């Protein structure tokens, strides 16, 4: 397979796709509203960020957002504390169920699979019925608007129902995946003082069933504000037997749509609390509001992901990652959300492709790390599965190389739309990503999303083109956090995003934006590789190194020595059966010098057993740098937030390299 050069055209939307895209319909509607002609995407984007109040008001009107009261003002406040649609009263969950009245009796809102391969469908009418019934029971239990409801549940339909019921009554949702250890969950939930917790006694992964009963009891026992613990299924006998269960709550009478009232709340009423990965320090409790998240997700799923009734979105995610919220947001477009509880590699490494074929997914999401593993394992999905329904593959979680674009087009589907994107938990969306009416270039993110005033800036705040800089956002956008929970005077929030450039959101990623608006994420800027005064994004290193035969994965950091000089070690995980040798070290350095520059060549190359990742698939560059600098593993990272809790154990031994 010949890999395309970065920036090579690899896909162009057909005239029919452009004509049918929801983005095209919005552009035509906007032209009629404004009494002007149709404009191209780049012109539309520039308008959306030059006049954000007008743009977001158009999104409200185009999608017919329902509010108990009209808003008085679209945008007020400041960049660090914007106010959106002031005076409105609405509910995010009400809009999630908007398609219920239009759906046929058997049209699925949710499809769910476990590792038993059985596909289970929840029609729209059943989803609506369960949400109303559970929400009514939550009110009966005394849940009031603003109460926090937390979940320690796998990716199953009940978790979606619980979230929607919580939001429907004005509760504040927060979720942790059941593979998280109790200490990690307590660090999160302990900050927000929940009233009720949903919990599953078991979850399945990799052909095994894991009992979490004691973990649940330990978590519940550490939350003094908790009044109710609802088990998905009754746990094994022991302390706390005879508990409140899901089935007991759902055994009440049906509640018709006419008899149920959603709690409509102000724009900044907390919708959910998401947490940063927690690799260092106490995880940040990031609060999003109803109005901001609703407007952002309406824009994202319709205009950028191009979802619609009949579409099926499948993204392998856990309930502790913001991508789970995005999958559920597919309901806003009347699309079907596909939920999978299990390992992406069980019972075979191509399990996700089998699922995509089985559920006839139109939109599939995966991490570049997963795609790279599939490529290296020689998987060829197109030879085994019918992926004729697949229109789009979304890549999220880390930078994606041209080689992975080439593999998808050669081994998955030749005409599939590849949409790399980048955003974050902080915004529960993307800054740059999919644009259904534009072409795709190898290794390139199509462009900034509407309403996201994204730029690359140098250290002095200068605009950069075709040069790596800090990813900044210069105008407010609705999905900015309302606040961090328990953050006095918003100090932690302001320090996190507005310290480097006052009044401008600095996300902490390196980005390169070319002259046509295409974007390349180059890794975390706080994991900067400073090579003789030149800043290098780690993604540049990884893309080159992982093309060297025998190298499976890699991690690079830049460490400061006692004398003030900088030292860059490169850690490499090798393919099974490959031994590290001087010849392999030389091959790595030669490749970096040839395909990168002399500055890309590390000061040392060290083979390791494992490259550490967070549970959400991000390389743990900063904890490794801290450990090499003398920090203990315990102070540098939370093991419960790691995909492999033992992956850092060997790194203290490499302090001798520095």
Image (cartoon, rainbow, N blue to C red):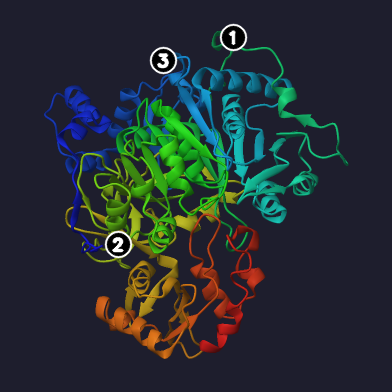
Q: Considering depth in this image, is 399 or 281 the residue closer to the camera?
A: 399
Report the Cα–Cα distance between label 2 and label 3.
Answer: 43 Å
Q: Secondary structure at mark 3?
A: loop
> Where, by quadrant of the figure, is residue 303 drawn?
top left
Q: Considering depth in this image, is 535 or 10 the residue closer to the camera?
A: 10
Q: Considering depth in this image, is 298 or 253 the residue closer to the camera?
A: 253
Q: Residue furthest left?
A: 37
When the figure is inspected, residue 299 is found, relative to residue 438, above or below; the finding is above
Mark found first going from the N terminus, 3 or 1: 3
Report the Cα–Cα distance between label 3 and label 1.
Answer: 19 Å
When the figure is inspected, residue 540 is found, relative to residue 324, above or below; the finding is below
Q: Considering depth in this image, is 101 or 360 the residue closer to the camera?
A: 360
Q: Secondary structure at mark 2?
A: helix
Q: Residue 102 shows which numbered tag?
A: 3
Asked whether the residues under the numbered discs 2 and 1 touch, taking CB atoms below 8 Å apart as contact, a structural biologist would say no
Asked whether the residues under the numbered discs 3 and 1 touch, taking CB atoms below 8 Å apart as contact, a structural biologist would say no
Q: Nearer the viewer, mark 2 or mark 3?
A: 2
Mark 2 closeness class: few <14, some 14–19, many ≥20 residues within 10 Å? many
Q: Nearer the viewer, mark 2 or mark 1?
A: 2
Left or right: 620 with respect to 26?
Answer: right
Q: Which residue is mark 1?
A: 259
Mark 1 closeness class: few <14, some 14–19, many ≥20 residues within 10 Å? few
Left or right: 589 with respect to 480?
Answer: left
Mark 3 closeness class: few <14, some 14–19, many ≥20 residues within 10 Å? few
Asked whether the residues under the numbered discs 2 and 3 touch, taking CB atoms below 8 Å apart as contact, a structural biologist would say no
Mark found first going from the N terminus, 2 or 3: 3
Report the Cα–Cα distance between label 2 and label 1.
Answer: 55 Å
Q: Which residue is mark 2?
A: 403
């Amino acid at each position: 397979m010949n890999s395309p050069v970065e920036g090579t055209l690899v896909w162009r939307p057909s005239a029919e796709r452009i004509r049918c895209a929801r983005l095209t319909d919005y552009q035509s509607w906007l032209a009629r509203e404004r009494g002007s002609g149709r404009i191209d995407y780049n012109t539309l984007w520039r308008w959306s960020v030059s006049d954000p109040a007008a743009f977001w008001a158009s999104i409200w009107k185009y999608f017919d957002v329902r509010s108990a009261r009209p808003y008085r003002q679209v945008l007020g406040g400041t960049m660090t504390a914007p106010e959106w649609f002031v005076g409105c009263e609405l509910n995010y969950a009400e809009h999630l169920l908007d398609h219920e009245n239009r759906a046929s009796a058997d049209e699925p809102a949710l499809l769910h699979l476990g590792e038993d391969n059985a596909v289970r469908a929840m029609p729209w009418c059943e989803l609506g019925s369960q949400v109303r019934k559970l929400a009514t029971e939550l009110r009966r239990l005394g849940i009031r608007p603003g109460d926090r409801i937390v979940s320690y549940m796998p990716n199953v339909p009940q978790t979606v129902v619980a979230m929607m019921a919580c939001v429907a009554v004005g509760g504040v949702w927060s979720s942790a995946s059941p593979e998280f250890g109790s200490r990690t969950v307590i660090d999160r939930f302990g900050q927000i003082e929940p009233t009720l917790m949903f919990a599953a006694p078991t979850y399945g992964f990799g052909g095994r069933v894991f009992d979490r009963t004691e973990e649940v009891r330990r978590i519940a026992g550490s939350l003094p504000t908790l009044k109710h613990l609802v088990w998905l299924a009754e746990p094994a006998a022991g302390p706390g037997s005879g508990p409140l269960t899901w089935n007991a709550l759902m055994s009440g009478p049906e509640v018709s749509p006419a008899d149920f009232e959603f709690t409509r709340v102000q724009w900044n009423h907390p919708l959910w609390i998401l947490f940063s990965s927690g690799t260092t320090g106490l995880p940040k409790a990031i609060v999003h509001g109803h109005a901001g998240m609703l407007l952002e997700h309406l824009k994202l799923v319709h205009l950028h992901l191009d979802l619609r009734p009949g579409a099926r979105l499948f993204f392998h995610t856990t309930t502790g990652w913001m991508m789970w919220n995005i999958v559920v947001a597919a309901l806003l477009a009347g699309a079907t959300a596909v939920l999978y509880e299990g390992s992406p590699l069980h019972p075979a490494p191509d399990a996700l492709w089998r699922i995509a074929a089985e559920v006839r997914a139109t939109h599939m999401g995966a991490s570049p790390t997963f795609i790279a593993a599939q490529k290296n394992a020689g998987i060829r999905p197109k030879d085994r599965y019918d992926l004729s329904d697949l229109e789009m593959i979304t890549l999220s979680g880390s930078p994606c190389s041209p080689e992975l674009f080439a593999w998808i087009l050669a081994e998955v589907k030749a005409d599939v739309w590849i949409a790399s994107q980048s955003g974050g938990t902080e915004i529960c969306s993307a800054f740059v990503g999919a644009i259904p009416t534009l072409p795709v270039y190898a290794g390139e993110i199509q462009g900034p999303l509407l309403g996201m005033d994204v730029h690359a800036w140098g250290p002095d705040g200068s605009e950069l083109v075709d040069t790596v800089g800090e990813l900044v956002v210069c105008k407010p956008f609705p999905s900015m956090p309302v606040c961090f929970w328990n953050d006095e005077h918003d100090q932690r929030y302001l320090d996190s995003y507005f310290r480097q450039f006052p009044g401008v959101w600095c996300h902490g990623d390196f980005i390169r934006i070319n002259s046509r608006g295409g974007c390349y994420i180059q890794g975390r800027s706080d994991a900067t590789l400073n090579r003789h005064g030149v800043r290098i994004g780690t993604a540049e290193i990884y893309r080159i190194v992982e093309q060297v035969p025998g190298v499976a994965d890699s991690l690079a950091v830049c460490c400061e020595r006692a004398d003030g000089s900088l030292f860059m070690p490169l850690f490499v995980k090798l393919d099974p059966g490959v031994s590290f040798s001087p010849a392999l070290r030389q091959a790595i350095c030669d490749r970096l010098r040839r395909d990168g520059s002399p500055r890309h060549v590390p000061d040392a190359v060290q083979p390791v057993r494992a490259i550490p990742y967070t549970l959400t698939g991000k390389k743990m560059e900063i904890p490794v740098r801290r450990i090499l600098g003398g920090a203990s593993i315990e102070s540098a990272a939370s093991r419960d937030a790691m995909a492999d809790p033992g992956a850092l154990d060997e790194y203290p031994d490499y302090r001798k390299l520095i």
